[in-house]
Image (spheres, rainbow, N blue to C red):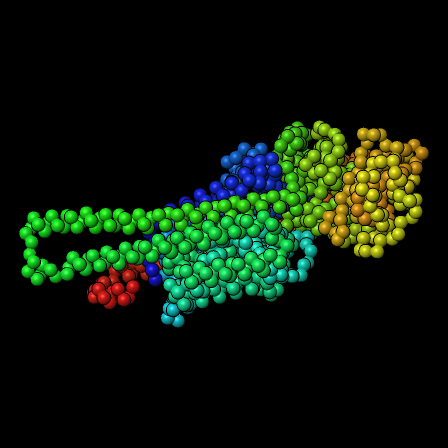
Amino acid sequence: MRPALPSGPGKAAALLAAAITVIALCAADVVARSYPFGPRTRSVNDLGNQYVPFHAHLWDLLHGRADGGLLVNWQSGFGASFLPDLGTYLSSPFALLVGLFPRDEIDLAVYVVTLLKMASAGAAMAWLLLTLRPGRWWAAGLLGASYALCGWSVADAAYNPMWLDGLVALPLLCLVGEWTLTGRRRMLGVLVVALAWIANFYTAYMATIGAALVLLLRLLLADLPRRRALAAAGRGALTVALGVGLAAPLVAVVYFGTRHAYPGRVRRFAPVPSEDLLARLLPTTYSFSSPALYVGVTALLLVLALPFHRAVPPRVRVGWTLLVVGVALSMQWGPTHLVWHAFATPQGSSYRQAFVLCALLVIAAWHSLSYGPPDRRALYAAGALLALIAVIASLSRVVRPFAWPVLLLAAVGALGGLALLRRAGDDRADDDRAGDDRAGDDFSGDDHAGNHRTGDERSGAERKDGVLAGRTRFAGLGRRVTPAGLAILLLVGAQFGEATATAAVATRLRLAHMDDYAPWGERQQEQSEAIARAEDWPRYRTDPGREQTVGNDPLMVGGQGAQYYSSLTSDVLSRTLTALGDGWTSRGRNLQSLDNAVTDVIFSVGARVHSPPDPHQAWFAQDGSGVTVSRQDVPPLVTVRPGHTRTGPAAFGPSPYHNQELLLGSRVYTVPRLTVRTAAGKRPDRSDDERPGLRLGPLPAGTSGTAVPMPTIIARCPAGSAVYLWAPHFSGTARLAGAPADGPTGLFRSDHPVTKIASMQRLGRVPASGRLRIDLSPNRTSVVRDGAVGCLDTARLRAAVDRLKATGATRVTVSDATLHAELPAGSTGTAVVAVPRTAGWRCATGNRSAVPAGEYYGLVAVPLDGSSTSLTCTFHPPGLRLGATAGGVSLLALILLGVLSVVRRRRAMGRPTPPTTTPAPGRLTNAL
């Protein structure tokens, strides 16, 4: 095998790739006027809803300010398992850097982490390229930047920063493959694999497949003896097995977390049309549902030229071409699509493995260039293929008009740069041949013919010839530098320009097509300060409020509430809160705050923040300013109920009002008969889809809030009771007729097909007459369910609170994963802990051994027999014990292999070195 490349060119190439990447990304955000270089937010979709809040929670953990620890997050979902979230979103070493930034600059911290990940990916790829084959360091740096700035990176992963760890991992895993070929750095290889899988196991899985394909191709091209090839493949498999084993404590927890998560939508994979696939190879194309395969026109031209590049050995040409084509086809076929995505079709983008193909394109481009720039014939063929791709891509809707001038300029720059680079190489070859001719003339034999010169004459002539030769070499150098310098300028300029444009277009189009959220500002600061003044955890919870800013407000601004958004939102939590009238988005995985007096009692929410609707969310912006806090007398986190009920959310009925009463243990609602009328005063038709209830059409645009007739709900309830409207499939606003002008307006948001449902809303109080009318203003076709209105008797609720306080825990303490409660003497029945009964909870009373916790309508429950005055519940994430066992076995195996390696090395050093025969120069040259 070839010896390792000196570190100098590798470092230079890595630095160049990182510099181009960072500068291009920042320039793109300047062009797009995106945060932090402009007024437009970059927090779109899950970046604002999930990833920034989770990084904010990590900041709190690092600074000792979080409620909870590594095992339990007490701030979200009334107590959620945190280790699976940590392994999914925050286990990257880069994530720790957020702790260096101020808390109110968390958006900037995530942005910097994103830049560093992309820059690191480019640097790692540049180093890998020079390891695979020697070549121009600047070209390796340029192609490394092509990889870091690929379409998948700037279009898909830029707002999913945890995926970028896979972008970094792929070239590192390919380096591990190179080490296994030569049997070097085995321990380091295992650690690299482990770190990749810990950082983000999802994309590390894809990167491992990609690196394995590269290793197999390298083994085939090396033409090694079968035994040596199998040994290298075995070393690679063992390295991956040990590395994944070391990562198992985290990977196993994430895996079991997904098993207990609320099920998302089951999707069937549908491949994109060929024109869309080819279009995504071009700059400034964008689409959420197609694979982002852009790697730059220069890299694309080099890949297209590879089959026609006669300087590249035929086996290399065929091997890399087939690998690229094979992986591209595997992305379009259902069975292999499932293999790439760990046998589960993704909920969002269907081509999350596209970065692997981008890496293969860049590596193939490097093989095309490292053997020398493509000749004229290969460049003509590449240009023709690029033109054909452009023609086919023109049929795709993902190509917008501004893509063509960018493509034209990039193609001219790339073709011109490659042609000049080829010319510079030809000039150098001519100069080398001229030098050989001059060297031959020096030894032409004139002196041997008797034309001897004196020493002074000879030395003078040699000095004259040396000057002339130096001038000739300098002139040749000038001829080489000028085309080569222009080539580098064109190639770098073209790559920088098209990458900047592509990233800017992706940023702008993402913002136009996705939900977006404001970065940390005065609103969040005011909410955070209000929560800090009001909270007294764990005596009671403080909810950040129904008027959410992002899907994980408790992680951003503090407090402890129902709100929680994660891919690992537990099934029991989602079903329990839905049965109680809560709303959600993202098909049940983004739970909202439930502003309801009864559920506040059930979950011990003693303080609740109220804010005006987020002005950044224009669809429901209202007048109003200022943050206020309301308080409610609530029982402790642990209450005692009569009997020994053991049942889950499946025991709930269709009415959230009745379900709340089941959990409360008291009757507090009146659910009246309803009269629903359309804006025309007619009875609505029944819904004909999966949403049960009466169907209401949307009001004409611009009529909401005017004096035109509106759909209504009419009912009768006890005077003075609190009116709640439960309409999960209604979208629009609802208001109690006759309520004060500054009274509450219910804001409902749902859709169809169902990806979000609306939460129960409080609308005011029943007037003295007992007759209530709710005016509806639907903004899309909606459904009003039977039993939609509930009237709460607040006096009965206060009586229920007094009973629960009288028998509840006298003191509750909470640590990372342990809750301890002191109970009144002689307590019997069932102790109910206001925490969702997710898998992993174990409880014990008194000094007894802990057993799996029971369940009381979805909450943690423990039977009491009157003999104990204390209760302790501890959470153990499912899979942690299994993962720790696997990790321990892998660590032991790694230590044993390390010891065996040291013993063998010492034995080899003790043996006498056999004599070696130095081969003749000609034989050595032939061997190399």
Q: Nearer the viewer, residue 372 or 526?
A: 372
370 in relation to 832, above or below: below
Say whether residue 709 is left or right of residue 911: right
* Quadrant containing the C terminus in the rendered view: bottom left
Q: Which of 357 and 411 is in front in this view?
A: 411
Residue placed at 67% from the left, 44% from the top?
A: 515
Answer yes or no: is residue 221 visible. no
450 in relation to 109, above or below: below
Q: Position of residue 494 (x, y in %)?
A: 47, 48
Q: Where is residue 807 in the image (x, y as percent from the top left)?
A: 76, 38
Q: Where is residue 362 in the image (x, y as percent from the top left)?
A: 46, 56
Residue placed at 77% from the left, 36% from the top?
A: 806
Q: Position of residue 625 (x, y in %)?
A: 72, 28
Answer yes or no: is residue 399 visible. yes
Residue farthest to the bottom? 226
Residue placed at 53% from the left, 51% from the top?
A: 407
